Amino acid sequence: MALKLYGAALSPCTSRVMTCLHEKEADFELVPVDLFAGEHKQLPFLAKNPFGQIPVLEDGDLSLFESRAISVYVAEKFKETGNDLIRHQSFKEAAEVKVWMEVESQQYHPAISPIIFQFFAAPLQGKSPDQAIIDENAGKLGKVLDVYEEKLSRTKYLAGDFYSLADLFHLSFTYYFMKTPCADLINERPHVKAWWEDISSRPAFQKVASAMNFGEKMN
């Protein structure tokens, strides 16, 4: 039975899980959730995720939400197929992956997501991007990227010389970020830029990126 993923292809959190599924060569069905109609806030969907957020993964009688947790589940369930995203055969490498997964969640994401919100979501609410919020978080993100630049000067990827969930987790939000005027924060750091160009060119992500057109939907 194919997995069912409830979400929207243009959503960065849905695309995070889709990228993982493609990396693991897993069969799945994307069940569209209409965000613009507020379907994710209606009772049928709230029964799947009481927080009213996408995506949700259903695997038989198992239902999961939170894109990072779903991706870990997929990587573990299909650990013997596709690319090893969790380094399950090396205790030390697996630990490094977990560290940098936490860095993405606790350091990178809190800085980059408000910038993306201001450029992409605020206009949908009839608001202009708040430059003060953008500048504040660009400063925070720059400090995080300084750490990345140093790390990536020593290893090809964040957790080591191997691609993992630690890198994959960055893809979808950074993809939208690179469409903003703040993209120089990535481009001006040569090791970060090379890393981004590497991971964003992977076939699994390219399958997903073509549908990530949230900005185009607004124009």
Image: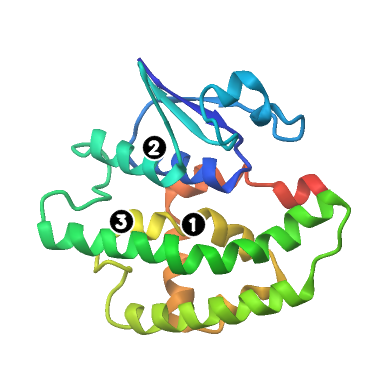
**Real-space Cα separation, disc 3 to disc 1, in angstroms:** 12 Å
User: Which numbered disc flags the more N-terminal residue, 3 or 1?
Assistant: 3
- Marks counted in the figure total 3
Residue 214 at x, y = what percent? 71, 47
Quadrant of the image occupied by residue 130? bottom right
**Real-space Cα separation, disc 3 to disc 2, in angstroms:** 13 Å
Q: Which residue is mark 2?
A: 21
With 57 as the anchor, is 53 left or right in this view? right
Number of other residues with Cα within 10 Å of mark 2, as a class: few under 14, some 14 to 19, many 20 or more? many
Residue for point 58% across, 26% down: 46
Circle 1 SS class: helix
Residue 101 at x, y = what percent? 35, 59
Does the CB distance between marks 3 and 2 fall below 8 Å? Answer: no
With 182 as the anchor, is 194 left or right in this view? left
Circle 2 SS class: helix
Q: Which mark is residue 171?
A: 1
Q: Which residue is mark 3?
A: 164
Residue 195 at x, y = what percent? 42, 70
Number of other residues with Cα within 10 Å of mark 1, as a class: few under 14, some 14 to 19, many 20 or more? many
Question: What color scheme is it?
Answer: rainbow
**Real-space Cα separation, disc 1 to disc 2, in angstroms:** 14 Å
